[in-house]
Image (cartoon, rainbow, N blue to C red):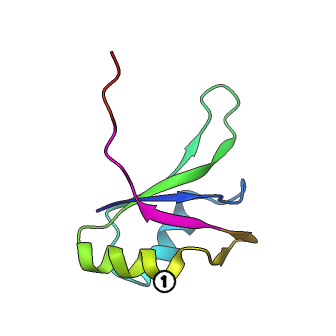
Amino acid sequence: MNIFVAKLNYRTTSEELQRQFEAFGEVSSAKVIFDRETQRSKGFGFVEMPDDDAAREAIKALNETEFDGRTIVVKEARPKTETY
C-alpha cells in the first residue's frame, strides 16, 4: 500500500520517515518530496508498505500524531491521475 504523509517538518528526512513506519512492519520505500528548483522539502512524502494490514495499522496509529515537532496527517495515497 502507498501511504501519503502530509504536514511534515521541513527538516524531516526520508530515513526518519522510514524509521517511523518500520515500527508497524516492513517498509519498501519512504520518500520525502523535494522541490526541484529550491531543493527544499515540500512538507509531504510517501511510504510504501507491502503488507496492507500493517499499512492500515500504521495509518490508524500515526494519523494526527506528533512527529518531528509537527502534527502529521497520514492516509492511503490516491492513485496518480493521468493528465493530458
Identify the residue at the far right of this view. Answer: 69
Give the amino acid at mark 1.
Ala
- Judged left or right of residue 64, residue 55 is left
Q: Position of residue 84 (x, y in %)?
A: 33, 15
The answer to which of 50 and 80 lies nearer the viewer is 80
Range covered by the magenta-colored residues: 72-80
- Tell me: residue 22, above or below residue 40: below
Q: Position of residue 55 (x, y in %)?
A: 34, 73
The answer to which of 48 and 71 lies nearer the viewer is 71
Q: Residue at x 31, y 80 (%)?
A: 54
Helix, strand or loop status at disc 1: helix
Q: Residue at x 38, y 54 (%)?
A: 77
> Residue 69 lies in what quarter of the image?
bottom right
- Tell me: residue 80, above or below residue 37: below
- Judged left or right of residue 22, residue 84 is left
Q: Residue at x 31, y 63 (%)?
A: 28
Confirm whether the magenta stretch covers residue 74: yes
The answer to which of 71 and 9 lies nearer the viewer is 71
Q: Which residue is mark 1?
A: 61
